[in-house]
Image: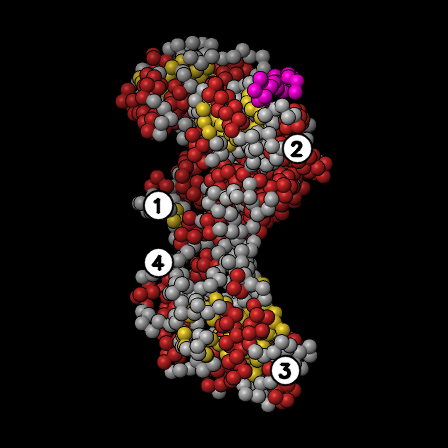
């Protein structure tokens, strides 16, 4: 065979007859599993199999990663022609199978991360050796974007790792480092250096002139036994039960991964690949996959890269960050910022208070060290970047100051003025308020153009979202600074405009209040909580209200000077006030809210609830309960879009998913309207308005979209 | 045309595990012995007139594979003319066999049949036949399918049966069975014999007269791990969100015993009885099946019974005695509550908790037990009902001739 060099790979055969195929997709940011690549790969691989002078082929990468996955851009156009797609996939499988059974050994020399399609390419080789580098990851992330590994991975993985282990990779998207991959049987060998990697690959080819895949070997036994073995039965039943427990059946990808395994391991590989292809195509066309790719992958990736920043603004460097208030939020902000390499000044009323805030970072780092995720040296360097103080003067030289003091406008007024006295005039001041309008707080500032909201979620080190709030007078530079800061600390920013509760708190509030209304109307508390979970909400509305405390809701309502508040707000307030004042049920912190929190035991719904509200199972059917809980959040999100609180649909989707756990299979709180069907959604809201009140009022804009049969993504277009 | 039950007979029931007395006996042999017993008990029975053997059997693989009814027919000595068909309506199979035989007779297709069932749970364990209900993800996940023990605990949770309630029921089953055994009331029961004619087992092996309520109270719930570790509590709650948590109350002492056994009934029309000089004991008055939600699964007896009663033009008060299969204590308890029936006329000689539940055979066994007891008490009507996997119920009403 002749040497080949193109924009996808290089292929050459050495003097010993061993072919080396180095994948190097020069026109892509990294190597991707795409139809054009696969076609070219299969062509050269087939030629190598046909050529008697080629004793074997080593497949490796010329990039830092081997191949981190499929080209998802390609998937967006798929699903429109299932028949053509199925035939195309079966042709691809036939060609891969030709190589697997062709008698020429192929070895994957995995010298970088191989995920999804990239890993499937390795599975289509007879032997896998991975470079023993801790940065290298191997896994199948497809389920996270609503798909299943469709390049043979779903049906092949169990042959290598057994049912139980492969489920962790396929269902949960486990990413294994080389040593774990070796232990689990995903790879056959590891090498310490790139040279050893190639030498081992070559040696294997020389020693295995007639390779056979385990799925072609009649003597091969599935590790742990087949589907109907005692272990197989137990594993499959446990997987079905636990999957429902976690996902409530809402994620077709996981369901169908199990299905493909169930069917696939009972039949010859070629028929199994056919089954896999059929279900893969079903998923590619599914609403859930489209939603998960759009919001969870494309949308979040773009947001993380700072898509929301004003284009004309230069990058805003943050070398030194000031934080006012070393409570839970301030302490968390200090940690994530110092972790990103910033010099942090953590200020509280007393130096001791600030030190207590800093100790939060100690705790996280101790845990990280014990789990080998950090080293004492790294931890010390991080802690050294956090300076604690009680003096505003230490804030001098900060590029950005984030205020995280109590939600008290008077206090915020004082600290704003204190800070601005030492902060350079061109630097940015941000408030981490979650409830007070930014424009109101900006009124305390001498430089409202540089005043912005940067709203973190608790716990800061775990929650990936940051909601940036633009006040009336906030200028582009401040927005750019806030976005650049968020990107620098590795979180996902969404930029919204000012409103009470902004976007996230406002819509989250509808989730909790609708739960309370249902309770008040006589729906059993357990039913409200469990139905919310069946829809994919991570926690029920009553439990989450206990978490944030009932008193917070009262405080927010009482401190809002707006006259004639919406009836729904007043209703929720009254219900909360009754529970807090007449029954002492303030929330989880006090051991008593909607639930009781026995020490050392599991939380249990307060047993008086059902009699207090005269609850009956028959009050409402569970479909209506589900719709009220979910629709309400979506309807409020749409109002935010319409009022300009949200700038784009994707911001609302991302904010709802990352901010308060709105389920990703719907795409997010706005895409949810499309998921339900916009006409159905409007009809449901109209019905609910007649039955349950004006909070269900559908705006003209939403109705117009529905009547035009448009998607929510076409709003304003 | 009417369908009559001329006789019914069952084997003793042996523990359905490796210590069980009947493990050494094939299920075909068990079925053969009840066929032979039918012949011996009915001296006028000209076996050449028996057309078919319909046997219920759930796990139709291995020893129970390849149409065990025909296997038993061949072994029975009735003659080569005798056909055999095996059916599976899970736990309702034995009663389904009787109902189908009754339907053949009523339709005029057949004159004389044997209907019954067999299950050797020691040799062919439950679940040996695979299936999709719990294993095929596209069926199990959307269907919110759960193992039966979870369904039973779900019934208890939903209808408020406490641990002590179900334990009391289990205790009562044992006491009634022990009393019936002591009084020798199981008159249509045969011992299982070996090839030498030696008795292998002469009484039901799982009756425990020494059972105490306290002892039952101390047993560990059997399905708690299944519910928490395998996620099935959450699956059940997805379907019944009004339940905060599943109360796991069932265990080996208040659930049916796993046993081996076989049973057979002789069913025919009036003319064949007259021809052969056989006296009909009961007529099959009505029979029905009804499906229910598959998650809670085991609540079918009440709706199936209502359907059968309606078909017969009867009220629940017209029934003198009931046999409601004690798959789990919550099942007959739910039945009694729904139907307004008192425990004093239900399972008067104990049930499957004490005596065992050989899946494919039980329905026919309950029928025979009820026939004997109705005659002994000189009563007229009886209703047999069983809950069935997948969410079904079956009921049959019999009436003395």
Q: Kindly report which numbered mark, 3 or 4, lies closer to the viewer in this rendering.
A: 3
Host chain of mark 1: A
Mark 1: few/some/many CA within 10 Å (<14, 14-19, 20+)? some
Q: Which residue is mark 3?
A: B49
Q: Secondary structure at mark 1?
A: loop
Classify 10 Å Cα crowding around label 4: few (below 14), some (14-19), many (20 and above): some
The reply to whether residue A438 is visible in this rendering is: no
Q: Are marks 3 and 1 in contact (CB under 8 Å)?
A: no
Q: Are marks 3 and 1 on the same chain?
A: no
Question: Regarding mark 2 in the picture, which secondary structure is present there?
Answer: helix
Same chain under badges 3 and 4? The reply is yes
Locate residue B230 relative to residue A358 in the image: left or right. right
Residue at which label 2 appears: A95
Which of discs 1 and 2 lies nearer the camera? The answer is 2
Nearest the camera: A61 or A214?
A: A214
Whether the residues at callouts 3 and 4 have beta carbons within 8 Å, the answer is no
- Looking at the image, tell me whether mark 1 or mark 2 is earlier in sequence order: 2
Report which residue position mark 1 lands on.
A597
- Rounded to the nearest angstrom, the CA distance separating label 4 from label 1 is 26 Å
Q: Quadrant of residue B281?
A: bottom right
Circle 3 marks a residue in which chain? B
Location of mark 4 (residue):
B220
| Position in image of residue A338 (x %, y %) | 39, 19
Calculate the distance from the C-alpha at mark 2 to the C-alpha at mark 4.
56 Å
Q: Are marks 2 and 4 on the same chain?
A: no
Q: In which quadrant is the C terminus of chain A drawn?
A: top right
Q: What residue range appears in magenta?
A: A1-28
On whether residue A15 falls in the magenta region, the answer is: yes
Where residue A363 sits: x, y (%)?
32, 28
């Amino acid at each position: 065979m002749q040497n080949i060099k193109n924009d996808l790979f290089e292929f050459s055969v050495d003097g010993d007859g061993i072919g080396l195929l180095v994948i190097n997709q020069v026109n892509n940011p990294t190597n991707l599993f795409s139809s054009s690549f696969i076609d070219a790969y299969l062509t050269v691989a087939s030629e190598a199999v046909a050529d008697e002078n080629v004793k074997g082929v080593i497949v490796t990468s010329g990039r830092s990663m081997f191949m981190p996955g499929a080209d998802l851009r390609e998937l967006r156009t798929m699903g429109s022609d299932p028949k053509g797609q199925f035939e195309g996939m079966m042709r691809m499988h036939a060609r891969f199978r030709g190589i697997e059974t062709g008698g020429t050994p192929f070895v994957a020399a995995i010298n970088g991360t191989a995920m999804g399609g990239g890993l499937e390419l390795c599975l289509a080789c007879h032997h896998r050796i991975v470079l023993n580098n801790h940065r290298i990851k191997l896994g199948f992330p497809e389920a996270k974007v609503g798909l299943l590994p469709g390049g043979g991975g779903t049906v092949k993985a169990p042959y290598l790792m057994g049912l139980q282990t492969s489920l962790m990779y396929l269902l949960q998207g486990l990413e294994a480092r080389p040593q774990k991959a070796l232990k689990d049987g995903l790879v056959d060998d590891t090498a310490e250096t790139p040279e050893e990697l190639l030498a081992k690959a070559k040696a294997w080819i020389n020693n295995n002139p007639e390779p056979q895949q385990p799925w072609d070997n009649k003597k091969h036994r599935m590790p742990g036994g087949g589907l109907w073995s005692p272990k197989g039965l137990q594993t499959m039943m446990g997987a079905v039960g636990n999957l429902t427990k976690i996902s409530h059946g809402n994620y077709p990808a996981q369901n169908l991964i199990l299905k493909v395994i169930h069917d696939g391991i009972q039949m010859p590989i070629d028929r199994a690949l056919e089954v896999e292809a059929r279900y893969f195509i079903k998923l590619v066309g599914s609403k859930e996959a489209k939603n998960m790719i759009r919001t969870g992958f494309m949308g979040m990736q773009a947001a993380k890269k700072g898509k929301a920043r004003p284009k004309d603004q230069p990058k805003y460097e943050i070398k030194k960050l000031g934080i006012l208030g070393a409570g839970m939020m301030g302490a968390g902000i200090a940690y994530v910022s110092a972790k990103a390499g910033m010099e942090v000044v953590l200020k509280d009323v007393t130096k001791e208070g600030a030190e207590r805030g800093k100790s939060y970072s100690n705790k996280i780092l101790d845990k990280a060290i014990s789990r080998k995720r950090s080293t004492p040296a790294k931890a010390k360097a991080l802690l050294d970047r956090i300076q604690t103080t009680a003096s505003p003067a230490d804030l001098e030289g900060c590029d950005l100051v984030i205020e995280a003091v109590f939600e008290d406008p008077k206090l915020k007024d004082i600290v704003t003025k204190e800070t601005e006295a030492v902060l350079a005039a061109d630097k940015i001041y941000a408030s981490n308020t979650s409830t007070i309008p930014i424009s109101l707080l900006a009124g305390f500032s001498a430089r409202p153009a540089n005043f912005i909201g940067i709203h973190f979620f608790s716990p800061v080190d775990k929650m990936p979202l940051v909601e940036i709030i633009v006040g009336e007078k906030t200028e582009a530079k401040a927005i750019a600074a806030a976005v650049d800061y968020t990107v620098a600390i590795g979180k996902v920013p969404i930029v919204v405009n000012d409103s009470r509760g902004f976007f996230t708190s406002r819509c989250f509030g509808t989730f909790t209040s609708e739960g309370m209304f249902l309770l008040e109307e006589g729906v059993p508390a357990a039913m409200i909580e469990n139905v919310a979970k069946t829809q994919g909400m991570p926690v029920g509305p009553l439990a989450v209200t206990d978490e944030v405390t009932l008193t917070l809701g009262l405080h927010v309502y009482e401190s809002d000077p707006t006259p004639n508040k919406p009836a729904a707000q007043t209703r929720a307030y009254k219900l909360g006030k009754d529970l807090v004042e007449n029954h002492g049920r303030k929330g989880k912190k006090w051991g008593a809210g909607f639930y009781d929190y026995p020490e050392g035991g599991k939380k249990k719904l307060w047993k008086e609830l059902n009699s207090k509200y005269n609850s009956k199972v028959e009050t409402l059917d569970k479909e209506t309960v589900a719709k009220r809980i979910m629709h309400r959040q979506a309807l409020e999100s749409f109002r935010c879009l319409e009022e300009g609180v949200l700038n784009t649909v994707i911001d609302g989707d991302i904010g709802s998913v990352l901010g308060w756990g709105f389920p990703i299979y719907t795409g997010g709180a706005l895409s949810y309207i499309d998921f339900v069907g916009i006409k159905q959604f409007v009809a449901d809201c109209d019905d609910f308005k007649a039955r349950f009140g004006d909070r269900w009022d559908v705006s003209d804009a939403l109705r117009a979209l529905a009547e035009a049969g448009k998607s929510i993504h076409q709003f304003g277009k | 045309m009417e369908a009559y039950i001329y006789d019914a007979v069952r084997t003793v029931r042996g523990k359905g595990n490796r210590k069980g007395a009947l493990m050494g006996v094939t299920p075909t042999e068990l079925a053969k012995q009840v066929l032979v017993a039918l012949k011996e008990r009915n001296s006028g029975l000209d076996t050449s007139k028996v057309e078919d053997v319909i046997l219920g059997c759930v796990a139709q693989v291995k020893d129970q594979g390849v149409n065990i009814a025909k296997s038993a027919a061949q072994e029975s000595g009735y003659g080569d003319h005798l056909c055999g068909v095996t059916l599976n309506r899970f736990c309702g199979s034995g009663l389904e066999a009787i109902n189908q035989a009754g339907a053949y007779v009523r339709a005029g297709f057949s004159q004389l049949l044997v209907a019954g069932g067999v299950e050797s749970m020691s040799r062919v364990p439950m679940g040996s036949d695979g299936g999709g209900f719990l294993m095929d993800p596209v069926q199990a996940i959307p269907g919110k399918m759960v193992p039966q023990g979870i369904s039973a605990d779900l019934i208890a949770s939903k209808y408020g049966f406490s641990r002590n309630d179900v334990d009391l029921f289990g205790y009562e089953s044992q006491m009634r069975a022990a009393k019936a055994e002591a009084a020798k009331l199981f008159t249509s029961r045969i011992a299982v014999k070996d090839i030498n004619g030696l008795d292998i087992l002469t009484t039901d092996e799982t009756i425990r007269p020494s059972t105490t309520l306290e002892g039952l109270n101390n047993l560990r719930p059997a399905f708690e791990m299944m519910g928490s570790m395998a996620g099935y509590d959450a699956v059940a709650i997805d379907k019944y969100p009004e339940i905060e948590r599943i109360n796991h109350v069932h265990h080996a002492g208040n659930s049916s015993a796993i046993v081996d056994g076989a049973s057979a009934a002789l069913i025919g029309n009036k003319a064949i009885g007259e021809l052969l000089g056989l006296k009909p004991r009961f007529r099959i008055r009505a029979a029905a099946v009804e499906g229910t939600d598959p998650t809670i699964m085991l609540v079918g007896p009440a709706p199936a019974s209502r359907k059968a009663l309606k078909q017969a033009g009867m009220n629940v008060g017209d029934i003198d005695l009931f046999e409601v299969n004690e798959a789990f204590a919550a099942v007959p308890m739910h039945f009694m509550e729904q139907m307004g029936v008192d425990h004093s006329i239900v399972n008067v000689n104990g049930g499957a908790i004490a005596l065992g539940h050989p899946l494919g055979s039980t329905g026919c066994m309950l029928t025979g037990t009820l026939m004997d007891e109705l005659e002994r008490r000189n009563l007229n009507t009886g209703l047999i009902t069983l809950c069935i996997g997948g969410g079904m119920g079956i009921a049959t009403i019999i009436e003395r001739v």
